[in-house]
Image: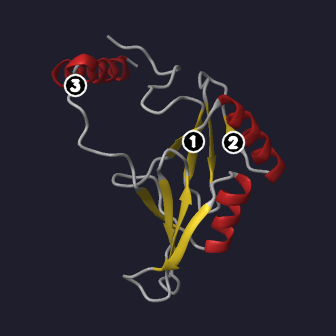
Amino acid sequence: MATLERDLTALAERRAELRARYLRPAEKREASNGGGVHHLALICADPERTIAFYQDVLGFPLVELFENRDYEGSSHFFFDIGAGNMLAFFDFPGLGLEPVPEGLGGVQHVAISVTPETFEKLKSRLDDAGVAYIGPDRGIKESVYFKDPDGIQVELIRQPLMEVPESAPQEG
């Protein structure tokens, strides 16, 4: 146990060092060069199943669908997730793609901001669709986490954009 405590202490010290070196106070930060996320592109097995989940269960309208310019027969389609941001998917029929484990370079989860009213409505829709989720519980006050039909973890967070979650640990 002493080794684990030392490791945790060292990791906390490293976070504090990184915060001290790189985290600038809001009033001293330059404006971002980015204009927002145009789209995040993910891979799905079945476009129709994905459309039914994101549009019909979550209420994110499908806004475009066309053939992928880089892979003949593949679809590329986009959902409006609000604030001028889109979530996009590709399918790659015939490639025999397998689910991937969580790992370096992969997507751990996609967090989508919703209003508190929409949060409650979407929790009910997840329940009605039989989609299992975790939260808000165990210290997670503002979020629910669940998997889409292809195992991509999605977080619905009732926190405005650019605000750190209220349940985030407060360190140094």
Give the image location of residue 95, x and y in percent.
47, 83
Q: Which image quadrant for residue 53?
A: bottom right
Q: Which residue is drawn at 58% across and 58% down?
A: 151
Disc 3 residue type (three-letter): Arg
Q: Name the residue under label 1.
A: 155
Considering only vertical position in the picture, is 3 above or below 82?
above
Label 1 Cα neighbours within 10 Å, binned few <14 / some 14-19 / many ≥20: many
Compared across the picture, whether 167 is left or right of 30 comes to right
Q: Mark 2 points at which residue?
A: 133
Camera-side residue: 116 or 111? 116
Q: What element carries label 3?
A: loop
The answer to whether residue 156 is visible is yes
In which quadrant will I find the N terminus? top left
Considering only vertical position in the picture, is 143 above or below 13?
below
Q: Is mark 1 on a helix, strand or loop?
A: strand
Q: Which image quadrant for residue 121?
A: top right
Q: Mark 3 points at which residue?
A: 29
The answer to whether residue 25 is visible is no
Camera-side residue: 65 or 156? 65
**Cβ atoms at labels 2 and 1 below 8 Å apart:** no
Q: Is mark 2 on a helix, strand or loop?
A: strand
**What is the distance, in whole Å, between disc 2 and disc 1 at their CAs?**
9 Å
- Single out the residue that lies furthest toward the left: 21
Give the image location of residue 63, x and y in percent.
57, 64
Camera-side residue: 3 or 139? 139
Earlier-in-chain disc, 3 versus 1 = 3
Compared across the picture, whether 19 is left or right of 110 comes to left
Give the image location of residue 32, x and y in percent.
25, 37
